[in-house]
Image (tube, helix red, strand yellow):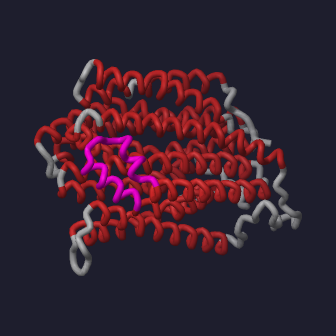
Amino acid sequence: METRKRETFAGTACKIALPVTLQSLLQSSFSVIDQIMIGQLGSGSIAGIGLGGKFTSIYSVVLAAIAAAAGIMISQYMGREDERSVSRSFWINMASSIGLAVLFLVLCTVFPDAIMAAYTKDEAVRALAVRYIRIFAVSFVPAAVSSVVAAMLRCMEAASLPLYAGVFALVLNTGLNYLLIFGKWIFPEMGVEGAALASTVSQITACVITVSLFIRYLHKKQMKLPAGWRGEDKMSGRRIVFKKEYGEQYLAILAPLLICEFLWSLGENVYAAIYGNMGTDACAAMTITVPVQTIVIGALGGLSQASGILIGKDLGAKEYERAYAESKKLMWYGISISVVLSLLLVMVSPFYVSVYHVEAAVRGEAVHLLTAIALIAPVKVMNMILGGGIIRSGGRTKYVMWIDIIGTWIFGVPLGLLAAFVWRLPIAPVYFILSLEECVRLGISFVVFRRRAWMRSLR
């Protein structure tokens, strides 16, 4: 495994963050394109695809937890040049991600009606959501493979390779959306099912390209595929054995991440249920803003992942003071860029909502929501960088788990229920009030960061 070359800190951060950011934006473009095209079919279709996407987002965030565990472990072991542990980390996370994908595939294909009944009482919207997730679930396994391979490439500072796959997949998704949603050329008009099929085919294609580029990169660098935990270390020739202690360490890192991401996603789904039960117009307005939320947050997602990788390598090499100093630089980068993005969002929001063929009331609510999103976005971004990248990098993921549980379940959910069903506020104030839990998270995260207990090198 190649030793990390010390470039300027900003240069190294950009080398990882920019490709990851662009890939996040491309990935979010899948939902943007789906929803803009589906938006031509009316509010019911928008709400259906939005609610279907809310449940599949549980899979996405739990998969992200596994990829985060992979990034924590691989980056630290690369920092101390422990190739055998890098190989073990790669394969155990690959097995975990595929197992998760199979579980959610079964849930979405066998029990979709029961699942979507929890989100809305509107039978027409529920039927559309069921049709969407049944097809989209096929993309779960290729997405699982792609995420772990991409994590490995980012730790190897080859983050541009997954980006190439994302570019091709975006072009393919756009073309298939047009053909399948509206029934152009020789294809049937499939509506929401066409959007699901287009995204699924694109995800499968992205997986094939990502794995192919990974293998080609290793061949170019004269490296071998990571050996399994019972394979052979190419440097020493010794057998790689899966030890009980390694499994315990893996679970100690992964379990809090899984609990954290699952409960956070469950909280987001409670928020979706709150919006859904406020009426179809409110739900449609929120769904319209989801692609923009994803893009704004995704624009800084690369910096969050770069934070975890760079600080993880410093911790693996036991460069603790450098890790602390570089963490503060990363936070300043994040807050500066996020403020600029929020200002741009306020400026473009009226033009964005005008793209959708929905009622004037829905467009008005969407503009108000986008203003609220712009106000809270810098705090969200800081939480991503600090909690989602820096604090996690030391492997003490239980800190982030408790921060997220307190924020979502002690503050966010109760505030959302009060605002929507007791105070009966419109959807924009409801969103802003429940999002104040981000401020609570950030305050706790700063305390944890300054105490430095998160800083450690894995065994």
* Residue 395 seen: yes
Left or right: 146 with respect to 346?
right
Residue lying at the far left in this picture: please name it.
360
Q: Residue at x 67, y 26 (%)?
A: 452
Front residue (pair 425, 336) = 425
Q: Position of residue 451 (x, y in %)?
A: 65, 22
Residue 60 point in image, percent of width and height: 49, 50
* Quadrant location of the C terminus in the rendered image: top right
- Extent of the magenta region: 111-134
Please indicate whether residue 426 sits to the left or right of residue 320 in the image.
Answer: left
Pick the front one: 351 or 187: 187
295 left or right of 391 in image: left
Please tell me whether the stretch drawn in magenta is mainly helix, strand or loop. Answer: helix
Depth check: give the residue in front, 223 or 128.
128
Q: In the visual, does 127 lie left or right of 439?
A: left
The quadrant where residue 32 appears: bottom left
Is residue 315 shown above or below 204?
above
The vertical placement of 286 against 15, above or below, is above
Q: Is residue 347 visible?
A: no
Seen as rendered, the residue at the extreme top is 423
Residue 4 location, x and y as percent? Answer: 68, 54
Residues 117 and 422: in front is 117
At x 31% / y 22%, what residue is drawn? 419
Q: Residue at x 73, y 61 (%)?
A: 1
Question: Where residue 275 sits: x, y (%)?
Answer: 30, 35
